[in-house]
Amino acid sequence: MDGWHFLVFTSALRYVVPVSTQDLGEALKALRRFPHLPEKQVLRATLIHRPQEMNAFELVWQAVFNRAPLAEERKGNPGSAPAQASGPGELGQGRGSGGVSLQAGRPSFAKVRALLAGWDRTVPEVALEETVRQLLGEAGAHTWLNAQELAFSRGQTTADDFEEARNHLESLAEALRRELKIRNIELDNSWESLHRESWQHKPLLGLTAEERSLVQTAIRQWGRRLAVRPGWRFSPTRRGALDLRATVREASRNDGRAFHLHYRRRLPRIPELVVLCDVSNSVAPYAEFLLFLVARLRANFRRVRLFFFIDTLWDVPAEIWDDDLQDLSPAIQSWSGKASSGFSDYGRVFRQLAENVLPEISALSTLLILGDGRNNFRPAQAEYLAEIEQNVRSILWLNPLNPEEWLARDNALPSYRPYCRAVYRCRTVQDLHLIAGALLR
C-alpha cells in the first residue's frame, strides 16, 4: 500500500471510526514490520478497537480499494451446506417426485448487483431498507427463500439447511446495503455520508444491539463525569470538605478553648428534575435512551420525578423507577392499554400537569419534556404551559423529529416553543450528549 492510498483510507475511516494519531503511527509501523501479512488484516488490527466498528471498516475498505463485496461469490463457499443429491423431480433427497429444485434459483450477489447497472441516484437512509427489499425481490431471492421454507415444512430439508438459506439471504442483503452506500459516496463525490455509519451519528431507532450497548456505555461515562460537577451552594455535613470558616467562628466564640471541626458538601446544581415523556408509538423508542441518561444523572439532583403521557398523565411510581429501568417497558404497555386512546393530546396533559402536579413542584425545578409535538389536530391549550413556565426554573423540550418537521400542520410545537428555554433535537447519541450538558447548566 502506497502512502496516498493509506491517507485516503484513513481519512475516510475517520468519518465513521475514532482514529487517533497514535493509531495511525502504530498502523504505519505494523505495515513496515509485517510486510508478509495482508494489509487489510494489519490495518484492522491496529485501527479497529471495537467489534461494532467492523462493518464500517469493511464499507470504507471496499469503497477505497474496490474489493469484491461478497465472499460467497468465491467458488466452494466453505460455510454452506453440501449440495444434496437430487431425486426424481429434483426434490433434494429424493422423497416423492415433481416440484421445484431446492438448489436451483439460489440467488448470488452477481445477479443482484446486475440490477444496479446504470444506477444513477443516491438512496436516502430512510429508503435504504425498502430499496434492498425491492432489489432482492427482483432477483428472486424472496421466492427462493419461500421455496426453502416450504421444503423445510414438508420435511424435505433439514433445519440446518433452512437456517443456512436464511443466513445466505441476510448476507446478500448486507452486501447490497454496503454496495448502495458505496454508490452514494461515489455519486456524492464525498465521504460525508459515512457520518451516518457511525453509531454516534446514527438515528437511535437504527442502532443494532451491539451499538445500543455502546450507547449505554457512553451514557454511563457521561454520568460519571457530570456527577462530579456540583453546584455552588454548601450544606453542613458530618463528612466532606473542611469548613474552615465555621470552625474558626466557633473557636473564636469560645476564645479558642474549644476546638471542633466542621464539614460541608456542595449541593446539587438543580434541586428537582421533572421528566415528562410521551410514550406513544412514535416517541416511545426514544424514551428508553432519555430515561437511561436521566438515571445516570440522578446524583446531580435532589429529586427526580417521572411522568408518562399519551393523552393523559401518569405519575410513575418510585418502585419501578429504578436505575436499570427493567420494569418500565411492561408497565408502559399495561398503563397505555388501560388509560389511553393511543393518540397524543399535549393540551390535555399540560392542563392536568398545571392543575394537579404544579403545586407540588419546586419553583427551582427544571421540566424536561420528550415529545414530537404531534397533537393530532387537538387544541394546543398553550396557556397551561405558559402557567407552568411561570412556576419552574426552566423548560427544556426534546424532539426526536428533524427540525424541518417541527412546523408540520399537526405539530403544536410552534405554540409551545415561546415558553421553552430551548428546544433540542433528540435523535442521535450526539444529541443526547448535548442534552446532558444542557441539563446541568
Image (cartoon, grey):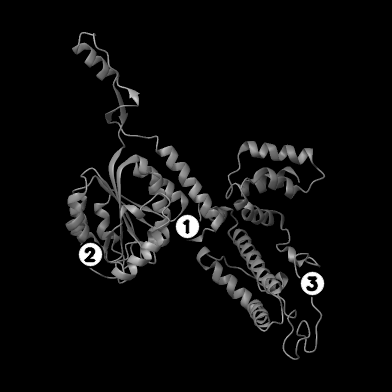
User: Where in the figure is residue 231, as x and y percent of width and height?
Assistant: 31, 34
Residue that appears at 39% across and 45% down: 436
Identify the amino acid type marked 3.
Pro
Between the C-alphas of marks 1 and 2, the distance is 28 Å
Q: Mark 2 or mark 3: which comes first in sequence?
A: 3
Q: Compared to 295, does 89 lie above or below?
A: below
Q: Is residue 283 visible?
A: no
Between the C-alphas of marks 2 and 3, the distance is 63 Å
Instruction: Tell me the quadrant of the picture where the C terminus can be found.
Output: top left
In what element is the residue under mark 2? helix
In what element is the residue under mark 1? helix
Residue that appears at 19% across and 48% down: 391
Residue on which disc 2 sits: 348
Q: Which of the 4 quarters of the picture holds residue 405?
A: bottom left
Q: Between tags 2 and 3, which lies in front?
A: 3
Q: Compared to 65, does 4 lie above or below?
A: above
